Structure formats: structure tokens, C-alpha cells
Image (cartoon, rainbow, N blue to C red):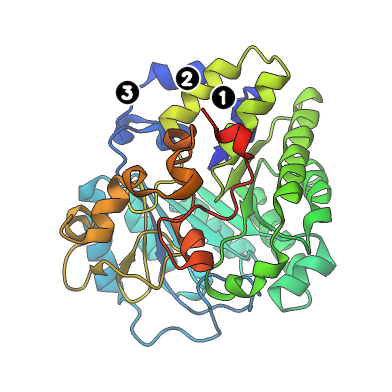
């Protein structure tokens, strides 16, 4: 994640990271990405079931649960292992996590074990009663996926009325004081919706938004032709920066992040240099601490059947299953060649990535996206939009 509001507007001062130990267990949530021990934030896809059918779903979710979904007891054992291992955050996803009957119990157990529990949801099933339950168990955050206003969003979700239901879910979270934010996947179809998302943040007092770059995984693989070209991506990132600063100058502080394209970090820094922004050196320090993409190191995924993946998009490759070995053991077993290389992947990069001066900041960007296009895990990420002159040392 690249914190646009934090880096460009200084809503969290760069010096904040220096005031804390960089061990993940001692960091506040907004600085977890700067931890030096990099215990993984884990996405757990607790069910394949979903009440919608989004055209870009990486998990290829459908209306029915998977036949081999982890049982409640197996889920509790998983949480025990993750907590003991030191994973700071457990993100419950799906499918639609609220389709799983024991979500409340599982999330509550994670919180009691000292983890920060969050959910990623389409928001349509968050009733007032469900929002109250989520608040009472100590859930930290609810990320609601919206890919535009009503017409565009419902097209992406495959169901008319999805936008209105999601907005009701957001309002229900707000009514009980549960932090809620938006998740938006950028592509050519909804590019013009970005300003409207910022209007929505202001109008409905939503404190946070994450703009996701498209990853070619699951049903999202069918949208490669709808991905932005490099010029459009630069325009989109500039628009996000400008609208974030516009709100900030109005005294309206929002947490704005971009996700799944770590070229955004150097791009923000280079823009600040051009603008002679005095905070640019501090921003560069933060980007160095962040280290870019952390799939297979500081970020991992567990599927509904217990399979362990480098991230939620890399579902075609499993390192093992938590029903056979604990996640903590699988994650630290470097006898798997891919796991070993992901722990130190900068050594294996090819092409323009290998010689890029931002490699330590970007971390090689998304390997699964490079593989999807070229068939080579270590090829350059096709979504990197930095020019050759911008990446040369």
C-alpha cells in the first residue's frame, strides 16, 4: 500500500515512524508496513460463497461454499497459530465473509488473541444488527468494495441494487462507530468515477479509501484489455493525488491509499521533487522502510480449504496446507524454491526491473501480474508505468 495522504499531504508525519520500535508487535496499525521483522499480514478467504458475482473477482467466488472449507474448529487452530507466530493483522475475506455463519465468532477469537481483525466485504449484508455485532467484538475496520456510482458499480457486481445496499451497510457501520472505508479497483470502465468517489468520501464522511490497480487473477484475468495503459495510469494517480490534496486544503483529512502497484511510491516522490516539496527526502525514507511489494514475506493468504499462497492473487500456486502443517511452519520453510526466492526476490528480477534504481523501494512490484502476461515469474511487471529515464540510476 502506498499512503498518498500520508506521503504527499503529511497527514501522518514522516518522523512518526522514528518514534516507535519497528517490531510489528509494537507498532500502531498505520505503521505496520514499516516493521523490520515483517511478520505477515494474512488474508484468510474464509468462504468461496458470495451473494454477488463481481466481474473482477480474483477468487472466482460463486453462490455456494466450497466443499472443503475449513471447519470452525480448524479455523480456531489456525488463529492460534497466527497469533503465536506474531501476525499483526488477520483480514477476513471471501467470497463474501458475511456469508460464513461463524464469522463473528472467528473474528472475535482473533481479537481476543491479540490480533487486529478486519474484513473485506461488498457491504450488502451489513444490517444494523450485524454492524453492532462487528463493533462489539472489537473489529478494527470494514473495507467495502465500490467500483463507482450506482450504474457502474452494479454492472461490476452483477446485481442491480448492490450500490444502494452497500451504502446502507456503510451507514450501518457508521451508526455504531465502526470504522469503514472504500475499496475501488481502477480500470478503463470506471476511470471517470474516481472524482465521484472523492465526492462520496466528503458527502458521507467516509474516512478512508483504497484505490486498487487491477491484478490479472481469477475473473480479473478477463479484464486485461480493460486495464489502463501507462499514460492513463499516470493520469489516474495524479488525479488521486490532486483530489487528496484538495480535500486536505479544505481541512478535510481522509486516508487515501493506492494498492497493488508499487511504482506509485517512486512516482509520488518524483512528483514531489519536481514541485520542490521540502518533504520529499522524508518521503523517500518512508518508501525505503516500506520496501514495496511483500508477497510471500510480509503478506500472505490462506484459502478456504487451508491452502497457503504468497498473496490472495497467487491462488494457482500453494506452498502447503495448514491442515497438514501450521502456517507458521509453511511460511518459514525455505526448502520450497519459490518461497525462498520470494523472501529475497530482488536477486532474481529480470529485464528493466533488475537494473531499476527503485528496486529497493518497489520490491519488484507484482510477480503474479508479470507471470500472467509473460509466463515468467521474474519478468518485469507490465503495469510499471515509470519511464526508462525515471528508473535509470
Residue under the point 73% across and 60% down: 167
Residue 3 visible? The answer is no
Residue 198's disc is none
Q: Secondary structure at mark 1?
A: loop
130 or 52: nearer the viewer: 52
- Image spot of residue 284 (x, y percent): 52, 23
Which callout, 3 or 2, points at the residue further toward the start of the chain? 2
Circle 3 residues within 10 Å: few <14, some 14–19, many ≥20: few
- Image spot of residue 278 (x, y percent): 64, 11
Circle 1 residues within 10 Å: few <14, some 14–19, many ≥20: some
Residue 326 vertical placement versus 271 (above, below): below
Left or right, 282 with respect to 81, comes to right
Circle 2 residues within 10 Å: few <14, some 14–19, many ≥20: few
Residue under the point 53% across and 78% down: 61
Residue 16's disc is 2
Residue 197 vertical placement versus 389 (above, below): below
Residue 119 visible? The answer is yes
- Image spot of residue 191 (x, y percent): 79, 55
Which callout, 1 or 3, points at the residue further toward the start of the chain? 1
382 or 213: nearer the viewer: 382
Please identify the residue farthest to the top as the structure is shown.
Answer: 278
| Quarter of the figure with residue 43 | bottom left
Give the labeled residue for mark 1: 12
Circles 1 and 2: CB distance less than 8 Å? yes
Residue 183 vertical placement versus 51 (above, below): above
Amino acid at each position: 500500500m502506498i499512503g498518498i495522504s500520508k506521503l504527499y499531504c503529511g497527514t501522518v508525519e514522516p518522523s512518526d515512524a522514528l518514534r516507535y520500535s519497528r517490531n510489528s508487535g509494537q507498532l500502531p496499525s498505520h505503521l505496520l508496513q514499516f516493521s523490520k521483522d515483517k511478520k505477515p499480514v494474512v488474508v484468510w478467504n474464509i468462504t468461496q460463497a458470495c451473494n454477488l458475482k463481481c466481474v473482477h473477482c480474483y477468487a472466482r467466488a460463486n453462490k455456494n461454499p466450497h466443499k472443503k472449507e475449513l471447519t470452525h474448529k480448524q479455523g480456531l487452530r489456525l488463529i492460534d497459530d497466527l497469533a503465536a507466530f506474531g501476525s499483526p493483522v488477520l483480514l477476513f475475506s471471501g467470497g463474501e465473509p458475511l456469508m460464513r455463519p461463524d464469522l463473528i465468532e472467528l473474528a472475535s477469537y482473533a481479537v481476543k488473541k491479540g490480533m487486529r481483525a478486519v474484513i473485506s466485504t461488498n457491504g450488502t449484508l451489513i444490517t444494523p444488527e450485524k454492524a453492532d455485532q462487528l463493533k462489539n467484538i472489537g473489529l478494527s475496520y470494514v473495507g467495502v468494495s465500490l467500483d463507482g456510482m450506482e450504474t457502474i458499480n452494479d454492472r461490476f457486481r452483477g446485481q442491480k441494487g448492490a450500490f444502494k445496499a452497500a451504502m446502507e451497510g456503510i451507514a450501518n457501520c457508521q451508526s455504531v462507530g465502526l470504522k469503514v472505508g472504500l475499496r475501488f479497483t481502477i480500470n478503463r470502465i470506471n476511470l471517470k468515477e474516481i472524482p465521484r468517489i472523492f465526492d462520496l468520501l466528503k458527502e458521507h464522511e467516509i474516512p478512508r479509501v483504497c484505490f486498487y490497480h487491477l491484478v490479472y487473477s481469477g475473473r480479473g484475468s478477463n479484464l486485461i484489455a480493460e486495464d489502463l495503459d501507462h499514460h492513463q495510469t499516470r493520469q489516474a494517480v495524479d488525479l488521486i493525488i490532486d483530489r487528496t490534496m484538495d480535500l486536505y486544503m479544505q481541512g478535510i483529512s481522509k486516508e487515501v491509499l493506492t494498492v497493488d502497484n508499487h511504482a506509485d511510491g517512486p512516482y509520488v516522490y518524483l512528483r514531489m521533487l519536481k514541485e520542490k516539496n521540502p518533504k520529499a527526502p522524508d518521503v523517500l525514507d518512508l518508501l525505503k522502510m516500506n520496501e514495496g511489494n511483500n508477497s510471500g514475506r510480509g503478506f500472505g493468504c490462506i484459502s478456504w480449504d487451508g491452502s497457503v499462497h504468497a498473496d490472495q492473487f497467487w491462488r494457482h500456486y500453494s506452498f502447503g496446507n495448514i491442515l497438514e502443517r501450521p502456517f507458521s511452519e509453511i511460511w518459514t520453510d525455505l526448502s520450497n524454491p519459490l518461497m525462498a526466492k520470494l523472501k529475497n526476490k530482488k536477486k532474481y528480477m529480470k529485464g528493466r526491473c533488475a537494473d531499476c534504481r527503485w528496486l529497493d523501494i518497489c520490491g519488484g512490484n507484482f510477480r503474479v501480474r508479470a507471470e500472467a502476461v509473460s509466463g515468467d515469474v521474474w519478468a518485469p511487471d507490465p503495469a510499471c508505468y515509470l519511464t526508462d529515464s525515471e528508473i535509470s540510476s
